[in-house]
Image (spheres, helix red, strand yellow):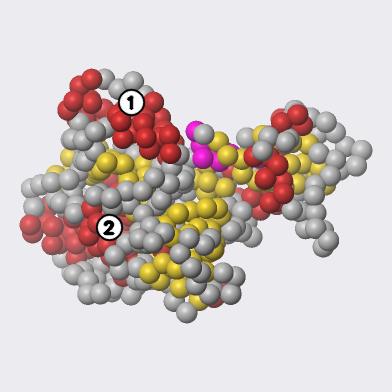
Amino acid sequence: MPYRFRNFYEVIEENTKRFPKKPIIFEEKLKIRWKELKHYVDSFARYLELVGVRKGDNVALLMSNSKEFVIAFLAIGKLGAVPVPLNTFLKRAELEYILNDCEAKLVITQGKFAELLEGIGGSTRVEKLIWAENPPRLDEKNLSFEEGLTIEDYEHITPQAELEDLAVMLYTSGTTGKPKGVMLTYRNIFSNIENIVKVFDIKPKDRFIVYLPMFHAFTLIATVLLPLYTASPIVIVKSIMPFSNVIKQTLLKRVTVFMGVPEVFNALSKAKLPWYFMWFNRIRYFVSGGAPLPLGTLERMRKKFKRAVLLEGYGLSECSPVVSVNLPHKQKPLSVGPPLPDYEVKIVDDELVELPVGQVGEIIVKGDCVMRGYYKNPYETENTIVNGWLRTGDLGYVDEEGFIYIVDRKKDLIICKGMNIYPREVEEVLMLHPKVELCAVVGKKDAHHGEIPVAFIKPAEGESITETELRNFLKEKLANYKIPRQFIFVEELPKNATGKVLKRVIKEKLNKGEFEHEFTKGN
């Protein structure tokens, strides 16, 4: 399909000409107009050029939600460099791995991450850091973000990126436990944005609220880049907590599109909201992604918000990220809707042969949304993209009208509160503990979180171990959201003939409640 723009900077230029004085970013009491945003992006791009950033360089962003994140992301792209947003929940070792893998020489960050990044140049290739908000110090290796917004000499810089160039690299953990860099081009993202606009008819008068972490593919593309594309203002909220502030900003800033994850909508459906919010809010779309939406939540939201519609969708980083979504004029409970207009979805067996309507198999996707591949990982790329079709690893089926239903995940991925947790990564750390002989991490269904990670532990012979001991051990090495919520100590784990632990059996028994009597703090 033809595309209007080659890169995000051309979007900024176009919208600045159309709406120079229109606010595009709201952050607390601050508002930034299109003309101001363009100036900040131009100035910061020149600053990055002076620092040494060139086309094709990977530039890491370790930042919580902020106007600085948006400005830095767009400025990096203007130079034809590639922004690499980092998960702000990661621990030191996890960050070091990603920084080394993407070969980043520059990190743009905030003062709140100073302790986490202390001495990072000694274990990575990082040469300089640019600090926004409370820099710990400023010298030749630690630079000021604010200074980068004051440069005027930028007229000579023209946008460097083409449609097939990389627009962003998003790291997602693999089943091997090592994160993989998902390479998305401008074509990938523009394809996703234009297809979403076809379904939702987004207008410049719409307003989006951004409270989920911007480093996440769904948040970044669907609630930041999409509204920038349609000239729809974004309301930036630095954190989801307290949630009352999200509600307040939604009302005060007249938000019309509210995207979130099931946990948010579950809480929203049960919350006692003030009458004036229910009366005066201007929301027309609620959109849920990241994990399956419970039917009870869907029904409560419909009863509570009669002027808005809650639509469930499905996607993954490798598909830029939205694959399908329910239609504003037609929704089906428990379905994630039909594919976006320009994408093909098939349900196939293990040999990639298409299955009949209603039969469960693996979901595969084809279209301009499919990523270029995994960074420096041709083996995983070839296994994931076959003849242009992306193997999602998710199991589902389609009905006669093409609506998709997710049944399960072929991989062992656990989605807890919209965050991906890969069991093998957790297991590899657990196995480093000298008192652990064998372990398995599986997902347990949970009404509030979607799933929670549960660890089954077989202690080493003659050893005694406690839950507290394991939690403290994991906290040093993993982000908090990856740490199992429950530990079950067992004498043996079920295995097949080759000695492989049968996680499917464990998970089935766990979700049937067969292990309830075995929950313990130790053994």
* 137 left or right of 454 in image: left
Q: Is residue 128 visible?
A: no
Alpha carbons under labels 1 and 2: distance apart = 29 Å
Residue named by callout 2: 196
Q: Nearer the viewer, residue 73 or 282?
A: 282
Indicate the amino acid at tag 2: Ile
Indicate the amino acid at tag 1: Ser
* 216 left or right of 429 in image: left
Residue 254, by quadrant, is top left
* 408 left or right of 265 in image: right
Residue named by callout 1: 244
Please give the range of residues in magenta: 448-454
Q: Neighbour class for label 1 at 10 Å: few (<14), some, many (≥20)?
A: few
Q: Position of residue 214 (x, y in %)?
A: 37, 47
Rendered position, 35 above or below 350: above
Q: Secondary structure at mark 2?
A: helix
Q: Position of residue 113 (x, y in %)?
A: 46, 41
Q: Earlier in the sequence, mark 1 or mark 2?
A: 2
User: Most prominent secondary structure in the magenta stretch?
Assistant: strand
